[in-house]
Amino acid sequence: MADGCGTGREAPCPGAAAALRRWEQLRRRAAAPWARGLLAVAAGLGLFYAALRVPLRLRDGLAAVTVFLSTLTPKFYFALTVTSSFISGLIFVFEWWHFRKYGTSFIEQVSVSHLRPLIGGVENSPPAPAAFSAGENEANRQNMPECKMWRNPLNLFRGAEYSRYMWVTGKEPLTYYDMNLSAQDHQNFFTCDTDALRPSDTVMQKAWRERNPQARIKAAYQALELNNDCATAYVLLAEEEATTIVDAERYFKQALKAGELIYRRSQNCHSQSPQHEAQLRRDTNVLVYVKRRLAMCARKLGRIRESVKMMRDLMKEFPLLSMLNIHENLLEALLELQAYADVQAVLAKYDDISLPKSAAICYTAALLKARAVSERFSPETAFKRGLSTAEINAVEAIHRAVEFNPHVPKYLLEMKSLVLPPEHILKRGDSEAVAYAFFHLQHWKRIEGALHLLHCTWEGNPQLVTSCSVLSAESSICQPLSLANHLLLILLP
């Protein structure tokens, strides 16, 4: 142990000591100011060289591209044009085929479902009232644009009401565009990702995409053969196969029985996975839709008080569903009962600046204000003595309503022929005016002098001159309907 590079407490070997001394000398020299300056100069020269080298490479690259483009012949450009046109044609044919088969654009579907989440957007999804908090619901309400197509809250039944127009005239009551929007609503409202696990729901998922009504009805019966408690199948039969409101109500009662059973099952397991939550939202949508349509059936069959009770119970059970505008159905039923105090209470709750307006809200508020003064109103007398406070309030309410939708007065005053209300409306547009006047004209006529006051006030409104142009987006929604056919739909049970 006396020789070699010992271990333990023995002195280190001479070679290691010399290496340590040289390392210490280098470290002291590197710490000197002149050494630091030399390193900084070297780093600066390296960066300067790199900065000069990149433009040189870019210039060489541009020169190479220029040479390549200059060597191209017209044949190349012709081949490039033909190839791009062929590819564009293939994309167009495939897009047309996909739209014809599924009713949606493939490019739009891919961009919304896959590309938008990648770039930080939010995917459009059907309303999920059961999973929304109150704050989220109000935020979504405020972010909703007014310039969009909305589902008509008072839309008619296809089999029991819209088909009457086709029986009388031989023409389709709804446009292709309107029916396509309804097909998209049905797919968003009545389907979910877990439908593939249940054969009956799989059949109904295909049924909502069918364009032929008979094919949809046949698929609904197939779904009922697989599962007698398929609520969406009963919904489709009530909407399209039933030829009377009584038959539609019978189907909806069967749908309600099946829908409540499925809804209770979904409530018990909705917290297990996101798929179960989506299924609960779908089952909630089905249940709300069925209860609302049952209330509308009761209204059409003359059981108005029962209809009002059903709507109030529905709004209490699902208070976050104001986006579905169930209160507009309630307003119309209360006006039929002439329960004007209840109408005013509903307006006080929903005629709020933070909520999207509608013609039903604005014109119903104007109707109540006009009711207080219309019976004794006379333009000549008002011109002589001036307007009273109640008359000023009525005139301001009518001005506010006309400012929101200037198309309504011509239909209420029967200066334009009524048309069949579409299944979708454009807020502040002619289609909304049609839908409102179709159901509320009788309420204005019931109050003596209300239409006279509307006529006098409307003629003096200067904004109507520039606001009565029909929006081009609605030209593909409404179909003409004679006044006789309108009365037919109103009066027949």
Image (spheres, rainbow, N blue to C red):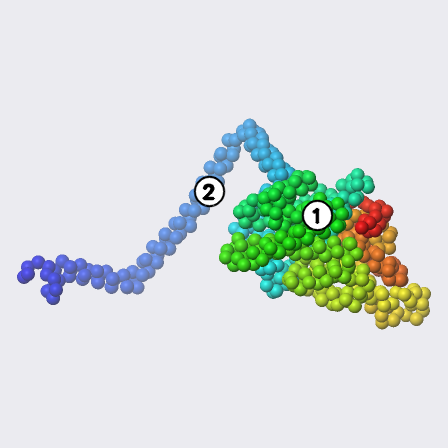
Q: Report x, y in % for residue 244.
A: 76, 47
Going by the image, does 206 lie left or right of 432?
A: left
Q: Sequence-wise, which precedes: disc 1 or disc 2?
A: 2
What's under tag 1, amino acid-wise? Glu
Q: Report x, y in % for residue 477.
A: 74, 46
**Residue beneath disc 1:** 239
Q: Which mark is residue 79?
A: none
| Count of numbered badges drawn on the protein | 2
Q: Report x, y in % for residue 361.
A: 76, 61
Please give the name of the residue rendered at 68% of the width and 53% of the height, measured from the top-left corner.
253
Using a 10 Å C-alpha cutoff, classify the residue at mark 2 as few (fewer than 14 neighbours), some (14 to 19) or many (20 or more): few
Q: Is residue 81 above or below residue 426?
A: above
**Residue beneath disc 2:** 59
Q: Is residue 450 above or below residue 214?
A: below
Q: Report x, y in % for residue 300.
A: 77, 54
Which of discs 1 and 2 lies nearer the camera? The answer is 1
Please give the name of the residue rendered at 79% of the width and 64% of the height, measured from the top-left corner.
365
Image quarter (top left, top right, bottom left or bottom right) of the N terminus: bottom left
Using a 10 Å C-alpha cutoff, classify the residue at mark 1 as few (fewer than 14 neighbours), some (14 to 19) or many (20 or more): many
Name the element at disc 1.
helix
Please give the name of the residue rendered at 54% of the width and 51% of the height, measured from the top-left corner.
117
**Camera-nearest residue between 363 and 163:** 163
Q: Gap in Å between the C-alphas at discs 1 and 2?
A: 69 Å
Going by the image, does 411 lie left or right of 269?
A: right
